[in-house]
Image: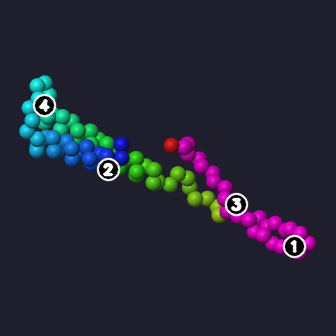
Amino acid sequence: MTIAGSIILIMLGAILTWAVELDLAGLDINVVGVILMLGGLVGLLFGIYRISVTRRAVGTIGEPAHRREIHEGPEARRTTVYEERHHYNEPPL
């Protein structure tokens, strides 16, 4: 459930709780509205938590990229290649 979906659930629950005056046999619309608002609140908190966890850095910043020079052909054209090696000590999420 995304943050937008959670906000929609909260709005729909608020409308059912405070704006609708409907009586159905065996169903209380006010209780349904409160349940939707609570579900939206839980989804909103989970969405915010998930965003805060995924935006953290996973590994530490190590050495800069390794440098290696390549010499090709008779002109001895010089090409510099930068390699990035990542060493993560933490398990993936």
> Which residue is at 86% across, 68% downward?
72
* Quadrant for the N terminus in the image: top left
Q: Which residue is mark 3?
A: 83
67 or 23, which lies in front? 23
Q: Give the SS element for disc 3.
A: strand
Q: For label 3, count other residues whose C-alpha is less than 10 Å away and answer few (under 14), some (14-19) or many (20+).
A: few
Q: Give the SS element for disc 2.
A: helix
Q: Which residue is mark 4?
A: 28
Amino acid at dot 2: Ala
Amino acid at dot 4: Asp
Q: Is residue 57 magenta?
A: no
Mark identifier at residue 76: 1
Whether residue 82 appears in this view of the structure is yes
> Which residue is at 19% across, 42% downward?
13
Q: Give the SS element for disc 4.
A: loop
Left or right, residue 47 beside residue 7:
right
The disc, 2 or 3, on the residue closer to the chain's N-terminal end is 2
Mark identifier at residue 40: none
Amino acid at dot 3: Glu
Looking at the rendering, which quadrant does residue 75 occupy? Answer: bottom right
- How far separated are the C-alphas under marks 4 and 2? 26 Å
6 or 71, which lies in front? 6
- How far separated are the C-alphas under marks 1 and 3? 21 Å
41 or 67, which lies in front? 41
The disc, 4 or 3, on the residue closer to the chain's N-terminal end is 4
Mark identifier at residue 4: 2
